[in-house]
Image (tube, helix red, strand yellow):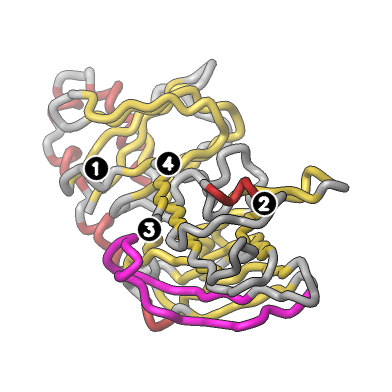
C-alpha cells in the first residue's frame, strides 16, 4: 500500500547574507510547517504499538514533550512484523544558482537501534523514480548532528530534495532545521533589467501627457528597485517580495499581517487570488505564462502594488 500526501502551499523564508542566499528554510515551528511538501508512505507496513500515528503519516511534525516549542519532523522504521521503512519527505521545488548546499540536523532517538536515511535529488518531479541519491548513511550518529552536503552537481537547476527513511527494524528518526543555500544566478536578475518595461512605459509617456500619469509615476519611483518593483499607493511596513524575476514560486513577507493577495494581468483581469492572513507566504505561479504581472497586497491599513517578472 502506498499513501501519498501532497500539501499544496509552501511556507518558508528566504534571506540574503551577502552572496549566499537561503532559498528554502524550515525549522518546523509553524503551524502548517509541511505545507508544500510531498509525503510518501511507500512501505505500507504496520507500525508497532504506540506508533499508530505513522499508519497514515510517512512523516509528521512532533515536539519535545518537555518543551513543546522544540519541533521537528519524525518518521519511524519500527513495524510489526518488522520490515524496511520507505518513507519520503520531499521539499517543494527549489531554484538553485551556484555553490549550492543543504544543511540540516538529524537525530535517531534510540542509541541501540539507530535509524539511517538517504538524501536524494530530482530535477523532474516528485515521483520516487525521479530521484537519485546524493547521501546515505546506514546508522546515523546518536545525538543531534548538524550536517551539510554539497548540491553543486545541480547548480542552475530546479530541484526537489527528498529525505528518505530506509531503515529496517529501528525506531524513530528526527530531522530539523532544513536549509538550502545558493548563490543566485546573475543571469536571472539580468533578465529583469533587460526587460526593463518600467523604462519602456516611460518611452510611451502618455501618462505624462494626460497628467494622470502622475498616478502611474509611482511606477517610475519604484524603477529604482530592480527586484521588487513597487507601483503602490501605500507603503506596507517591512514588505518584501522575492525572487524577482520568478520562475515558479515567490515569497511575500511583511512586518504586518498580509490579509490577501491578487495577481492582475496586463488586461486588468484578476487571474490569481488567495487569502493569506499571515506575515509570510509563498505563492506558486508555475501555471502562468511568461510576462509581467501586477501583484496587489492587502493589509488592514494599506494596499500595495508590485510588478513581477515571470520567466
Q: Is residue 282 above or below residue 261?
A: below
3 or 1: tag closer to the N-terminus: 3
Q: Which structural element holds mark 2?
A: loop
Residue 165: quadrant of the picture: bottom right
User: Residue 137: within the magenta?
Assistant: yes
The residue singled out by tag 4 in the image is: 9
Q: Indicate which label's residue lies in the foreground, 2 or 1.
A: 2
The residue singled out by tag 3 in the image is: 93
Rendered residue at 29%/31% (across/down): 263
- Give residue 266's position: percent from left, percent from top: 16, 32
The residue singled out by tag 2 in the image is: 51
* Marks 3/2: CA–CA distance: 30 Å
The quarter in which the N terminus is drawn is: bottom left
**Residue count near mark 2 (Cα–Cα under 10 Å), binned few <14, some 14–19, many ≥20:** some
What range is drawn magenta here?
Answer: 116-142
3 or 2: tag closer to the N-terminus: 2
Q: Is residue 311 above or below residue 124?
A: above
Q: Indicate which label's residue lies in the foreground, 4 or 2.
A: 2
4 or 2: tag closer to the N-terminus: 4
- Give residue 246's position: percent from left, percent from top: 32, 52
Q: Which structural element holds mark 4?
A: loop
* Marks 4/2: CA–CA distance: 27 Å
The residue singled out by tag 1 in the image is: 198
Say whether marks 4 and 2 touch (CB < 8 Å).
no
Q: Which structural element holds mark 3?
A: loop
Amino acid at each position: 500500500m502506498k499513501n501519498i500526501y501532497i500539501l499544496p502551499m509552501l511556507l518558508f523564508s528566504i534571506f540574503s547574507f551577502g552572496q549566499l542566499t537561503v532559498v528554502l528554510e524550515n525549522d518546523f515551528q509553524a503551524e502548517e510547517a509541511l505545507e508544500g511538501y510531498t509525503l510518501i508512505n511507500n512501505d505500507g507496513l504496520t507500525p508497532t504499538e504506540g506508533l499508530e500515528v505513522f499508519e497514515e503519516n510517512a512523516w509528521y511534525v512532533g515536539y519535545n514533550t518537555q518543551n513543546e516549542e522544540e519541533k521537528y519532523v519524525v518518521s519511524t522504521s519500527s513495524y510489526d512484523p518488522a520490515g524496511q521503512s520507505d518513507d519520503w519527505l520531499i521539499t517543494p521545488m527549489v531554484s538553485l544558482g551556484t555553490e549550492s548546499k543543504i544543511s540540516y540536523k538529524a537525530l535517531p532517538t534510540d542509541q541501540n537501534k539507530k535509524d539511517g536515511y538517504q538524501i536524494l535529488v530530482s530535477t523532474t518531479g516528485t515521483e520516487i523514480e525521479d530521484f537519485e541519491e546524493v547521501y546515505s548513511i546506514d546508522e546515523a550518529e546518536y545525538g543531534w548532528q548538524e550536517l551539510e552536503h554539497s548540491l553543486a552537481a545541480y547548480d542552475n537547476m530546479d530541484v526537489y530534495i527528498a529525505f528518505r527513511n530506509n531503515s529496517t527494524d529501528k525506531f524513530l528518526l528526527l530531522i530539523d532545521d532544513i536549509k538550502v543555500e545558493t548563490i543566485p544566478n546573475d543571469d536571472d536578475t539580468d533578465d529583469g533589467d533587460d526587460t526593463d518595461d518600467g523604462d519602456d512605459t516611460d518611452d510611451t509617456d502618455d501618462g505624462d501627457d494626460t497628467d494622470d500619469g502622475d498616478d502611474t509615476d509611482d511606477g517610475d519611483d519604484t524603477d529604482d528597485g530592480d527586484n521588487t518593483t513597487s507601483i503602490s499607493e501605500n507603503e506596507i511596513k517591512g514588505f518584501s517580495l522575492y525572487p524577482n524575476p520568478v520562475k515558479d514560486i515567490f515569497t511575500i513577507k511583511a512586518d504586518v499581517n498580509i490579509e490577501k493577495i491578487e495577481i492582475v494581468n496586463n488586461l486588468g483581469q484578476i487571474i490569481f487570488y488567495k487569502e493569506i492572513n499571515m506575515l509570510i507566504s509563498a505563492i506558486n505561479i508555475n501555471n502562468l505564462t511568461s510576462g509581467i504581472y501586477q501583484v496587489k497586497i492587502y493589509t488592514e491599513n494599506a494596499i500595495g502594488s508590485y510588478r513581477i517578472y515571470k520567466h
